[in-house]
Image (tube, grey):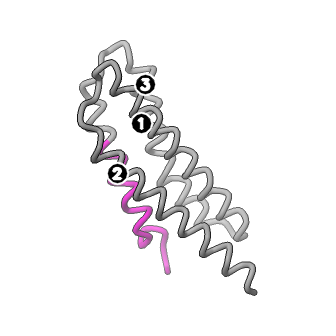
Amino acid sequence: MESFRELIVWQRGIQLVSSIYERTKGFPKEEIFGLTLQMRRCAISVPSNIAEGYGRHHTNEYIRFLQIARGSLNELITQLEIAERPGYLQDIGDILKDCDDIGKMLNVLIRRISEHTNNR
């Protein structure tokens, strides 16, 4: 693979960022520097860490950045659940499914890179 842009998990991460930006537009103004900003940062962190890890020269560093992306994704899932309770978001099932899919892709990528490294 010549670029991280070819990774489907990165592409799905970019789509997730767009979805989060769209869904957080209607949050109350008092949440701009709270939940809105935090959710956007977590979403941005997912494809950003995939890209940064891809550019690292050591496999262990790449895996570490993928793990950070997975952590950011889990944080975002938690924030989605939090935002749903006061009614800032409704019908989050589809975006939670996207998050679960991205998480599974990250797990597979981490496992494959780890196995490849161990089989050398």
Vertical arrangement, residue 98 with respect to residue 89, above or below: below
Stretch in magenta: 1-19
Q: Which residue is mark 3?
A: 35
| First along the sequence among labels 3 and 1 | 3
Residue 114 lies in the magenta-colored region: no
- Residue at x-position 24% and y-position 25%: 26
Q: For the residue marked with disc 2, what is the amino acid?
A: Lys
Compared to 116, does 63 lie above or below? above
| Image-based side of 80 in relation to 1, left or right | left
Is residue 115 positioned above or below 80 on the image?
below
The kind of residue on which mark 1 rests is: Arg
CB under 8 Å between callouts 2 and 1? no
The mark that comes first in sequence, 2 or 3, is: 3
Rendering coords of residue 85 (x, y %):
35, 22
Disc 2, SS = helix
The percent coordinates of residue 97 (x first, y second) are: 34, 51
Residue at 43% from the left image edge and 24% from the top image edge:
35
Residue at which label 2 appears: 97
Q: Main secondary structure of the magenta part?
A: helix
Residue linked to disc 1: 40
Kindly report the distance in space between the C-alpha atoms of the residues bearing marks 2 and 1.
18 Å
